C-alpha cells in the first residue's frame, strides 16, 4: 500500500498560511483534490488490477485534468504493500484536504477500485477493516463543501439505492446541496445485482478502462479541446455495456450545472502552467484603476474585478441618460438590474435562450454566471403495462428536463433591462436587456430584445427573443468598446420598436380595408 500525503506543515505557522490562502482566494478557481483508492489483497476473492486502476487514474488526473500531484491522495493495498486500515487513511486524506480546500470554490474527485456489496438496500465499498456505505463517504466529502464532486466507483453491486436513487425530497442530500454547487457526478460500474469485471488482457477493470479511454480519446473532446463530464459518462456507459454484452450496466447519476471542464486535450505540464500563472500575476500593471495591457487568454481575478468595477457606473450612467433622452411617453416604463421587470414567461424564455446561446456561440460563462440543471423525467407508470418489449426498447432512452439559470450576482454578472408596456392596441409592448458576464477567456455580453404581439385580447404573444452574444478580450479599451456597443444596441432597439409599431398599425389598417 502507498498513501501519498503532501509535505507536512509546521502547525505553528498554520494560521499565517490560512490567512495567505484567504487573501488570495479570488485568484484560485477550481483547485482540484482527489482521493484514489485501489485494493487487490482481499482475503476472500483477491483482485488483480485494482492497484493498477488507481495508479493509472492518479496519473491521468495529473496529465490531462489539471490536478497537482500534491493534491492527489492515493491509497493502495496489495500483497507486496498491504495495509488494513483503509478507513483511517481515508480519514487522514480528508483531514489534509480540509486544511487547503476553499469551500464552494475547490473541487473533489473520488475513485475506488475493489469489492463492493449491496446489503440491506445500501451500496457499500469493502475496505479491509469495514464495509462503508457510499452514502457515508459522500456525507464526509460533502461536508467540506466542494464546488464540484465527481465519484468514479469500479466495484460490484455499487449502483444500488444510493443517494438520489429512491431518495425522497427531504432526505435527498444532493437536492439540498445542488443549489450551492456546480454539481455532482456519480459513475458506478454496475447495478446492485451485477458484478464489475476486470480483464487480464487490459490489466484493468472494464469500467476503469473505459473511464481512462474516454479521457485519452481526443475525438470526443469538444471544439475547444475540453472534455465535459457528460461526454465521459455517455462514452463509458455505452462502451462498458456493449463490451460486457450488457452483463455489466453502469449506473450514472449526473447533476452537473453549467459547462464544467473535466479534462483538456492540450493540458500542459503542471510546472509549466504554474510558472505561466505566476509570471502573469507578477506583470499586472495598474494606473489610476485603468487596465494598461491585454490579458488573454488568462485573465487574473483581480483584473476581472477591476474591469467590472469600471463597467458598473458606466453602464448605470448609459441607461439613465438613454431613458432621459428618448421619448417613451406612450409606454408604462420600468427598468431593473435583472429580468424581474418582465412578465414571468418572458423572463423564463430569455433565461433559457441566453444560456443556450452562450454555449452554442462558445462564449462560455465562468463561476456559474449561466448554468443548466438536467433532471431525469420519471417514466409514466401507466406505460409500465405496455409490456416487456416496449420497456426493452426504451431502457436506453432516458428523457431529461433542463432548467437554465442566470446568477444575478454583481461579481459575475452586470445586468440592465428596460420594459415598455403598452395598454394601447396600436402600440407594441417590447423590452430590451443587456448582460455583461465573466467568460472563459475574457468577457461576454448578451444583448436581447423582444416584442409582444396582439393575440386578439391583449399584447401577450412573445415574438423573439432576438439575442446576440459578443466576446471581448480584456485590455485598456474593453470598457469603452462594450459601452459603445451597448449604446448602439439601444439605438437599434428604439428603431426596431418604431418598426414594430409601424407593422402593427399597417396590420390594423390592412384588416380594416378588407373588413365589411
Image (cartoon, rainbow, N blue to C red):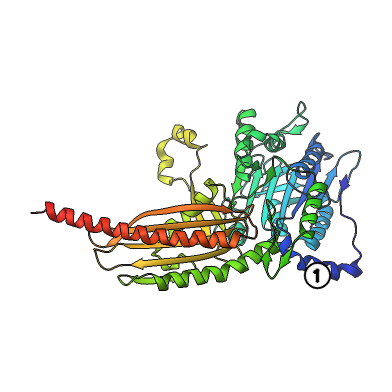
Task: Indicate left or right for 252 with 506 as reference.
Answer: right
Residue carrying label 1:
19
* Residue 103 visible, this angle: no
Q: Quadrant of residue 61?
A: top right
Q: Judge whether 30 appears above or below 60 on screen.
A: below
Report the label total: 1
27 or 99, which is in the foreground?
Answer: 27
Task: Indicate left or right for 297 with 1 as reference.
Answer: left
Quarter of the image where the N terminus is located: top right
* Residue 78 visible, this angle: yes
Q: Residues within 10 Å of mark 1 (few under 14, many from 20)?
A: few
Quarter of the image where the C terminus is located: bottom left
Residue 474 screen position, x and y as percent: 64, 57
Residue 120 screen position, x and y as percent: 65, 50
227 or 463, which is in the foreground?
Answer: 463
Helix, strand or loop at label 1? It is: helix
Q: Quadrant of residue 105?
A: bottom right
User: Farthest left residue?
Assistant: 516
Residue 111 screen position, x and y as percent: 74, 46
- Identified at 19% across, 57% down, the residue is 508
- Identified at 76% across, 33% down, the residue is 204
14 or 137, which is in the foreground?
Answer: 14
Amino acid at each position: 500500500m502507498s498513501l501519498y500525503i503532501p509535505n507536512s506543515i509546521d502547525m505553528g505557522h498554520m494560521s499565517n498560511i490560512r490567512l495567505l490562502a484567504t487573501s488570495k482566494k479570488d485568484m484560485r478557481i477550481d483547485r482540484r483534490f482527489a482521493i484514489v483508492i485501489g485494493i487487490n489483497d482481499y482475503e476472500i476473492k483477491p483482485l488483480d488490477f485494482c492497484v493498477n486502476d488507481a495508479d493509472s487514474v492518479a496519473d491521468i488526473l495529473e496529465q490531462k485534468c489539471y490536478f497537482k500531484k500534491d493534491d492527489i491522495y492515493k491509497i493502495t493495498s496489495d500483497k507486496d504493500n498491504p495495509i488494513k486500515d483503509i478507513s483511517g487513511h481515508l480519514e487522514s486524506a480528508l483531514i489534509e484536504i480540509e486544511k487547503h480546500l476553499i469551500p464552494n470554490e475547490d473541487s473533489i474527485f473520488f475513485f475506488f477500485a475493489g469489492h463492493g456489496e449491496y446489503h440491506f438496500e445500501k451500496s457499500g465499498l469493502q475496505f479491509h477493516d469495514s464495509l462503508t456505505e457510499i452514502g457515508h463517504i459522500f456525507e464526509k466529502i460533502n461536508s467540506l463543501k466542494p464546488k464540484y464532486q465527481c465519484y468514479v466507483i469500479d466495484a460490484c453491486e455499487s449502483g444500488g439505492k444510493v443517494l438520489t436513487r429512491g431518495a425522497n425530497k427531504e432526505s435527498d442530500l444532493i437536492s439540498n446541496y445542488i443549489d450551492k454547487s456546480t454539481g455532482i457526478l456519480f459513475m458506478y460500474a454496475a447495478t446492485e445485482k451485477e458484478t464489475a469485471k476486470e480483464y487480464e488482457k487490459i490489466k484493468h477493470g472494464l469500467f476503469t478502462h473505459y473511464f481512462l479511454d474516454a479521457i485519452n480519446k481526443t475525438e470526443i473532446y469538444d471544439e475547444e479541446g475540453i472534455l465535459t463530464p457528460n461526454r465521459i459518462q455517455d462514452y463509458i456507459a455505452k462502451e462498458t455495456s456493449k463490451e460486457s454484452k450488457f452483463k455489466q450496466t453502469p449506473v450514472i447519476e449526473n447533476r452537473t450545472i453549467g459547462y464544467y471542464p473535466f479534462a483538456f486535450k492540450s493540458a500542459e505540464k503542471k510546472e509549466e502552467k504554474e510558472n505561466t500563472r505566476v509570471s502573469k500575476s507578477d506583470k499586472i500593471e495598474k494606473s489610476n484603476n485603468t487596465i494598461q495591457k491585454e490579458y488573454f487568454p488568462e485573465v487574473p481575478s483581480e483584473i476581472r474585478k477591476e474591469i467590472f468595477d469600471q463597467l458598473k457606473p458606466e453602464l448605470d450612467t448609459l441607461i439613465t441618460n438613454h431613458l432621459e433622452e428618448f421619448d417613451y411617453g406612450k409606454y408604462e416604463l420600468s427598468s431593473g438590474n435583472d429580468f424581474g421587470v418582465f412578465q414571468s414567461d418572458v423572463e423564463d424564455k430569455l433565461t433559457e435562450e441566453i444560456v443556450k446561446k452562450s454555449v452554442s456561440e462558445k462564449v462560455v460563462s465562468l463561476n456559474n454566471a449561466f448554468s443548466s440543471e438536467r433532471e431525469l423525467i420519471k417514466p409514466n407508470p401507466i406505460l409500465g403495462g405496455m409490456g416487456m418489449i416496449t420497456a426493452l426498447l426504451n431502457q436506453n432512452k432516458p428523457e431529461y428536463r433542463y432548467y437554465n439559470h442566470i446568477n444575478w450576482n454583481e461579481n459575475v454578472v452586470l445586468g440592465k433591462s428596460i420594459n415598455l408596456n403598452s395598454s394601447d392596441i396600436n402600440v407594441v409592448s417590447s423590452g430590451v436587456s443587456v448582460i455583461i458576464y465573466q467568460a472563459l477567456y475574457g468577457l461576454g455580453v448578451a444583448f436581447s430584445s423582444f416584442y409582444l404581439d396582439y393575440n386578439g385580447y391583449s399584447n401577450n404573444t412573445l415574438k423573439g427573443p432576438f439575442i446576440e452574444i459578443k466576446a471581448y478580450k480584456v485590455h485598456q479599451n474593453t470598457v469603452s468598446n462594450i459601452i459603445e456597443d451597448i449604446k448602439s444596441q439601444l439605438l437599434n432597439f428604439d428603431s426596431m420598436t418604431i418598426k414594430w409599431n409601424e407593422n402593427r398599425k399597417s396590420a390594423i389598417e390592412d384588416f380594416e380595408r378588407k373588413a365589411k
